[in-house]
Amino acid sequence: MAMLTRPDDLGKLVAYVRSLGLEPREAERRWDHIGGVIVDASLQPRTKYKTVVLPRVRKVISQWPDAAVLSGFRRRLESEDLSGFLRWRSTSRKLAVVTGLTAALDGLGIETVAELAACYDGGEREQQTRRALRQVSGVGPKTVDYIAILTGSTGHVAVDMHIAGFVRAAGVHGGDYRAISALITRAASELGCSVGALDAAIWNYMSSKDHREATEA
């Protein structure tokens, strides 16, 4: 796809945000539990978050407190039936993503959420982390950015169907992942908020919109 280079794209997006009355709020989205981060990031693609993913993440956090660190989570994966614990289909590729991400983080020497968060430094360390995580089958740039958000970053945007759909609704078309991410970043600067706050505001609006439309259908 083409990059977003038209000079009016930024204006369209900012105007659309303002026309809807969206109010980006600065609130950290973070799990202080690396098992929770991994499960959240692995299960969330194309899955209802509040009703399907979130309850399972909370179960991991509450019932596996030792999995707050990677070594503890690895022991749980070795001794427990993850499919049964999560009540998730055993043949699902997402369970393989859980084990793949766990192995990748272990290879990077990551033990805690704080250590993982420090890897997203905008420099070579982040690029190394991205390369390692992208080696996991089923993990794309969105999941890598989403993991940053789950560690507390407010400087990343995870461009999923909600974010991309919002940009299209604003009248901006034809952008790839990097272009949409850059546009959201520029719009956040124009609106005087963090990238993470705008990402969350858009995602919440679009997910609520989907719920309303499903209810009214």
Image: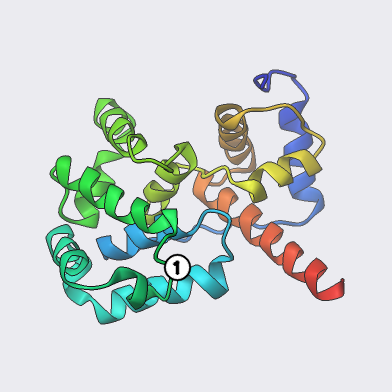
How many tags in the picture? 1
Furthest residue toward bottom: 63
Q: In the image, what residue type sits under mark 1?
A: Arg
Mark 1, other Cα within 10 Å: few <14 / some 14–19 / many ≥20: few
Tag 1 residue: 89
Kindly tell me whether residue 151 is visible in this rendering.
no
Kindly tell me whether residue 82 is visible in this rendering.
yes
Classify 137 as above or below 43: above
Viewer-proximal residue, 8 or 189?
8
Q: Residue at x 67, y 62 (%)?
A: 207
Q: Where residue 53 sits: x, y (%)?
A: 48, 68
Q: Where residue 152 sits: x, y (%)?
A: 36, 54
Q: Where residue 112 sits: x, y (%)?
A: 18, 56
Q: Secondary structure at mark 1?
A: loop
Q: Residue at x 36, y 35 (%)?
A: 134
Left or right of 157? Residue 122 is left
Viewer-proximal residue, 97 or 197?
97
* Residue 145 quadrant: top left
Left or right of 56? Residue 213 is right
Left or right of 26? Residue 109 is left
Q: In this figure, which colouring scheme has been used for the structure? A: rainbow
Q: Where residue 84 sits: x, y (%)?
A: 35, 76
Classify 7 as above or below 67: above
Q: Quadrant of the C terminus?
A: bottom right
Furthest residue toward right: 217
Left or right of 194? Residue 216 is right
Q: Residue at x 31, y 28 (%)?
A: 127
Q: Quadrant of the N terminus?
A: top right
* Residue 205 quadrant: bottom right
